[in-house]
Image (spheres, grey):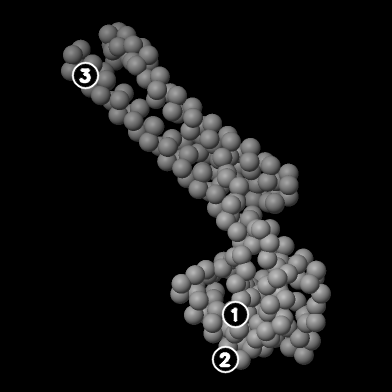
Amino acid sequence: MIQARTRPIRIWIAEDEDELRELLQDALTDGSRRVRTFQNGREVVEALHQDRFDILVTDLIMPEMDGIAVLNEVRNFLPDCIVIIMTGYASLDTAIQAIRGGAYDYIRKPFKLNELEIVIQKACDRIVLLQENRDLFQELREAKEELRQLKETWDEHLNQVLSICWMIFGERKSPETDLILKQVNPLTPNLNHRKGEAEEKVFETLQRLTELKREKSITEQEFSTFKSLLLKRLTE
């Protein structure tokens, strides 16, 4: 079954004003988040060579490298990253361009901390949803691979029995062959048990998928797509 997320969400903040940077760090840090701050965009890009983030909150106007340049650089490292732009009213048009260029959202200065918290929480929910979807696909792949291996094992076992029958009785279909094949079934309880476990895993994943739809964490279309994949795995 899908495991609950245990790793804190990693938030990076790029802001050249010391007082605001420290204020944002204190406001966004809690037990489920790990916050790291940077004085400019250049430091963010350099840090990407050693570490990764889930959410980047960056000022639009900064020395050395502005928010747009940072956005372009980090998306080369992390195509699925979430970038939130902080901008003044005078540069609002540029912030809108950043959204079109791949930024997740923007917030206009001056803003209240609870306004930023709303944006951050939505971004965190999106990260959790994306991770659950990845976990779901991974479980589907594992279930499919286990079923495939079980089928190969059974086919190999059956072919060996048929080959022996063919050598003994000279034909693949005979009363003696049928009798031997009936006697094979009691020899494979473990195989049948393992196959049942693989099918049970698929059904557990389907149940979790239904819960995600009920919680409105995924759309009806996403639910239908995942469900079709699950049902297909059971019939392959």
Callout 1 touching callout 2 (CB < 8 Å) = no
Observer-nearest of 122 and 186:
122
Q: Which of 131 and 229 is in front in this view?
A: 131
Percent of width and height locating residue 149: 37, 36
Q: Where is residue 117 in the image (x, y as percent from the top left)?
A: 75, 67
Residue 10 lies, in percent from the top left, at: 59, 65
Mark 1, secondary structure of its residue: strand
As shown in the figure, which amino acid type bears the numbered disc 3?
Answer: Ile
Q: In this view, does 169 lie above or below 206?
A: above
**Which one is in front in this view, the residue at disc 3 or the one at disc 2?**
2
Please tell me which of labels 3 and 2 falls first in the chain.
2
Give the mark toward the camera: 3 or 1.
1
Q: Earlier in the sequence, mark 3 or mark 1?
A: 1
Q: Which amino acid does label 1 sit on?
A: Phe
Give the percent coordinates (x, y) of residue 175.
Answer: 30, 8
Residue bearing mark 2: 64
The image's mark for residue 164 is 3
Q: Mark 1 points at which residue?
A: 38
Q: In the image, what residue type sits under mark 2?
A: Glu
